[in-house]
Image: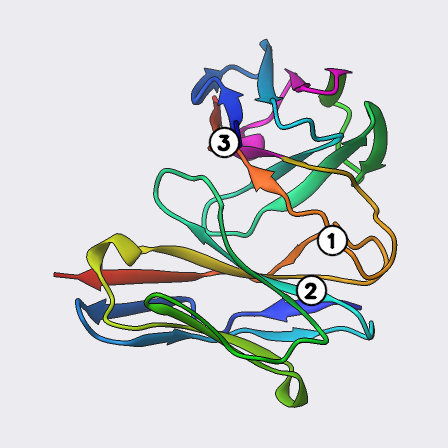
């Protein structure tokens, strides 16, 4: 299984709602990522988990709260979002993160969750 | 600092035409990786190629070919005999020798192939 799955595919929420995005992989990868992609822009890294521990937080506002309950699952909890948070949220996974110099761990991307905040 | 520039915002071609997508990068690292990803309207980022900075050999995969030139810091992507299914946004990306798994994306080039 070389797939990263994300649910839901689409999500519409109000600014007072609490919702969660889910990402799953069964490739035995120990690194998982959240990216945010606004329309007509490249993906921007938000968070990286390595061995279920948060390794990178790219100064993301606290209204986005990531969680990695186990090595196969990554959640993104959303609360009190703003309309400008509307975007495509992409999840990715790789074998590891932060390898020795000169090597690379390829990231496999999921199809994304298209989020609209009203 | 690392940076990737894709100067072509949008390209339109007619089916069967050849098209080249440009990518210019900046990095101070001596070891780095370059990538191309395809993003169709469905949204998923599809990996196309990875190139190590020490390997300047050009690569061909079917209708796709890549030209890596360190002297001009460019990693251009050519689609030969384009097809409607090639319509997508294409991203060039870079990762450095430290934090090797952190991808720096260019702004992308939207390719539209008309029948």
Q: Is B8 in front, or is B43? A: B43
Vertical arrangement, residue A8 with respect to residue A88, above or below: above
- Snapshot quadrant of residue B23: bottom right
Q: Which residue is mark 1?
A: A104
Residue shown at the point (12%, 61%) measured from the top left: B115
Which of disc 3 and disc 1 is earlier in sequence? Answer: 1
Residue B98, numbered circle: none
Q: Give yes or no for contact between labels 1 and 2 (Cβ–Cβ under 8 Å).
A: yes
Residue shown at the point (78%, 62%) measured from the top left: B96
Name the secondary structure under disc 1.
loop
Name the secondary structure under disc 2.
strand
Q: Position of residue A37 (x, y in %)?
A: 55, 42
Q: Is B112 in front, or is B95? A: B95
Q: Is residue B115 left or right of residue B4?
A: left
Compute the Cα span from label 1 to label 2: 8 Å
Q: Which residue is mark 3?
A: A112
Vertical arrangement, residue B84 with respect to residue B75, above or below: above
Vertical arrangement, residue A35 with respect to residue B95, above or below: above
Q: Is residue B10 left or right of residue B82?
A: right
Q: Give yes or no for contact between labels 1 and 3 (Cβ–Cβ under 8 Å).
A: no
Q: Position of residue A40 (x, y in %)?
A: 46, 51
Q: Nearer the viewer, mark 1 or mark 3?
A: 1
Q: Which residue is mark 2?
A: B33
Q: Chain of mark 3?
A: A
Give the residues in magenta.
A69-92
Same-subunit check for callouts 3 and 2? no
Compute the Cα span from label 3 to label 2: 24 Å
Residue A81 shown in magenta: yes
């Amino acid at each position: 299984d070389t797939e990263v799955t994300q649910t839901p595919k689409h999500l519409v929420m109000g600014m007072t709602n609490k919702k969660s995005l889910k990402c799953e992989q069964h490739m035995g990868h120990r690194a998982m990522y959240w990216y945010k992609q606004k329309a007509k822009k490249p993906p921007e890294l938000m968070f990286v988990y390595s061995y279920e521990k948060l390794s990178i937080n790219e100064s993301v506002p606290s209204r986005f709260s990531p969680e990695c309950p186990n090595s196969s699952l990554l959640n993104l909890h959303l609360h009190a979002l703003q309309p400008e948070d509307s975007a495509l949220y992409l999840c990715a996974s790789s074998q590891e993160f932060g390898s020795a110099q000169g090597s690379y761990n390829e990231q496999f991307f999921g199809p994304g969750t298209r989020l609209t905040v009203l | 600092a690392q940076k990737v520039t894709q100067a072509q915002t949008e390209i339109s071609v007619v089916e069967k035409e050849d098209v080249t997508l440009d990518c210019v990068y900046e990095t101070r690292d001596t070891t780095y990786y370059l990538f191309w990803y395809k993003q169709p309207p469905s949204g998923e980022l599809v990996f196309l190629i990875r190139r190590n900075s020490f390997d300047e050999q050009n690569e061909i995969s079917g209708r796709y070919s890549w030209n890596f030139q360190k002297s001009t810091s460019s990693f251009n992507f050519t689609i030969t005999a384009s097809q409607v299914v090639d319509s997508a946004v294409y991203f060039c990306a870079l990762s450095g020798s430290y934090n090797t798994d952190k991808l720096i994306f260019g702004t992308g080039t939207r390719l539209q192939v008309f029948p």
